[in-house]
Image (cartoon, helix red, strand yellow):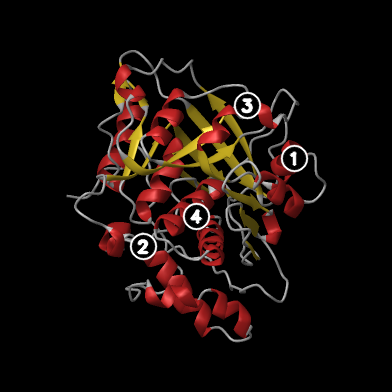
Amino acid sequence: MTHTGAATVSIRHSTHHGPPATGHHAYCLDPLARLRTPADPLCDVYLTGTVFLDIIFTGLDSAPVRGTESWARGMGSSPGGVANMATALARLGLRTSLAAAFGDDHYGDYCRDALEQGEGIDLARSRTVPGWHSPVTVSMAYEGERTMISHGHEAPPPESALRRPPSARAAVASLTPGRRDEWIGQCARAGTRIFADVGWDETGRWDPADLADLEHCEAFLPNAEEAMRYTRTRCPLAAAHALADRVPMAVVTLGSEGAYAVDGSTGESAQVPAIAVEALDPTGAGDVFVAGFVAGTLAEWPLADRLAFAGLTAALSVQEFGGSLSAPGWLEIAAWWQQVQSLGGQTTAALRRYAFLDQLLPAPARPWPLRRAVPTIGFRSPA
């Protein structure tokens, strides 16, 4: 996410290769603390999907060339796929429950342990499938983009436990054109608030009637190209307004131009520009954006604050590599806010856009930039 307009908050990005950070659990703010009651569901956000093992190479100067060997200056491994979203939600202090199948191999054990023990994600509705190996994705980041190669066998069918989602404040779904997912309707009928994005329509139809589960959604968060194709419009803002006729909240991500949202029930709209950052790896940035918007919505923040927070968390994520590896927690957000206020040349309006953070954030315990520990399967935790 790069934007150089006058309304942006500019960040000087520096590269840090010091000792790894000690992890995000040193402080985890609860954004819903003032809203919680004894009658609330134990789960804030439920989601289901496929967990991949992601292996990420960074520091490539260009795309690999056929017949040659390329060396990457950076590498990491982490749970990917739906784990990107689950991790982003958990690091923002939301009680997250994930229903997924895990491979019966070392990769599966590693991913399960990283999510359950490392991130505190509830995996009670997940299971390990005997004889099924974990899907794997190799991601190569260069020139601000990424190229991915994936391998995996057909996912096992969901068991009955996966068809009985838990009581939850919200659920995050990825809509599939031409297919209904039974669990989405079940959650909606139980009062769960559904937030959804959508993948690329490989059929080329781009028919909104194919998004049957959109009727259950409180918020729909496509990117600009997807939104315009589904609404047959030529402007992302017009697309957002058209989508707001079909779903209570339409949020369209605009890449380097930030994001735009329309509340279909009130007519309110908001647009927030992107934050200027040096992008290392965009993997998982869309998931982090959705997680930030979900957190702000459940916390009942104003629409513009939700958009700004979602864009901020996504911008912080692209400065690190990996999907779930790069999702920021509250310490990263606090350190960013402290750092950006200390820089000269910032516009007052840009800083005011993020002033709501003052009421939320802990005092940062470590200086910016922060660097998380880089999980590598071969490493063992120190005694």
How far separated are the C-alphas under marks 1 and 4? Answer: 22 Å
Res 293 label: 4
**Which residue corresponds to mark 2?**
19
In-image side of 374 versus 30 (left or right):
right
What's the residue at 59%, 46% (across, down)? 221
Q: Disc 1 designates what residue?
A: 231
Which residue is at the front of the view, 117 or 378? 117
What residue would you read off at disc 3?
177
**215 shown above or below 251:** above
> Looking at numbered disc 2 in the image, what kind of residue is underneath it?
Pro
Residue 303 vs 121, above or below: the answer is below
The furthest residue to the right: 234
The residue sitting at the top extreme is 131
Secondary structure category for the residue under label 2: loop
Question: Closest to the observer: 72 or 34?
Answer: 34
- Residue plotted at (41% across, 24% down): 134
Give the spatial CA distance, label 2 vs label 3.
45 Å
Q: Position of residue 296 (x, y in %)?
A: 45, 59
Query: Within 10 Å of the Cα at label 3, are there few (<14), some (14-19), or many (20+) other Cα atoms?
Result: many
Coordinates of residue 302 in the picture (x, y in percent): 50, 66
The mark total stands at 4
Identify the residue at the far front of this view: 266
Task: Look at 40% across and 49% down and name the residue there.
Answer: 89
Q: Quadrant of the N terminus?
A: bottom right
